[in-house]
Amino acid sequence: MVDPFGAVKGRAVTALRISAAITLVLAGMTAITVDLGAALDLFFGGLVVILPQWWLAHQLGSRRWAAKPALLAVAKYSLTGAGFAVLFALKQEVSGLAVITGAAMAIGVTPVAYHVKTRRISG
């Protein structure tokens, strides 16, 4: 059976890979220019956003979530919230600015990468 969401899933996963790669590069540059702690915080902030989005991308079109898109969105945001809670609970010294920067960057890069990937395919 052909997955009607296959192309969308593929572009979403590619966009998330690009976002993760950019997060890793930015964290590396932060480690070189600032310090390792801030770089890790930036990386973990991006990861907290990227992992639930990756999970959501893989759930697209699944029979389990087909009739419950609102519940799928709630689950994704709950995973993100839990990720931030775990990060701030487990890490002793946290640079809030670095965490938020990593998260904001991941939130911003993913749709841009998806759009670019879609335009390359259609154009």
Image (cartoon, helix red, strand yellow):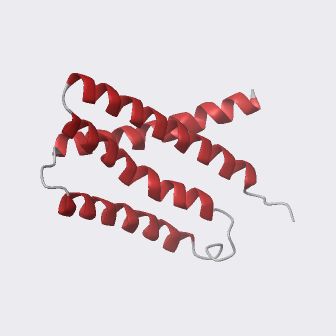
Q: Residue at x 58, y 39 (%)?
A: 114
Location of residue 20 in the rendering, given as x and y in whole percent from the top left corner: 46, 40
Q: Residue furthest left?
A: 93
Question: In which quadrant of the rendered image does the C terminus lie?
Answer: top right
Q: Residue at x 56, y 69 (%)?
A: 69
Relative to the observer, which residue lies in front, 106 or 66?
A: 106
20 is higher (above) or lower (below) than 49: above
Q: Residue furthest top?
A: 33
Q: Which corner quadrant of the image does residue 29 belong to?
A: top left
Q: Is residue 69 left or right of residue 44?
A: right
Q: Which corner quadrant of the image does residue 113 belong to?
A: top right
Q: Which corner quadrant of the image does residue 27 belong to?
A: top left
Q: How many marks?
A: 0
Relative to the observer, which residue lies in front, 67 or 20?
A: 20
Q: Residue furthest right?
A: 1
42 is higher (above) or lower (below) than 71: above
Q: Residue at x 46, y 59 (%)?
A: 52
Location of residue 81 in the rendering, given as x and y in whole percent from the top left corner: 31, 63
Question: In which quadrant of the rendered image does the N terminus lie?
Answer: bottom right
Relative to the observer, which residue lies in front, 88 or 4?
A: 88
Q: Is residue 78 left or right of residue 8?
A: left
118 is higher (above) or lower (below) than 9: above
Location of residue 36 in the rendering, given as x and y in whole percent from the top left corner: 22, 35
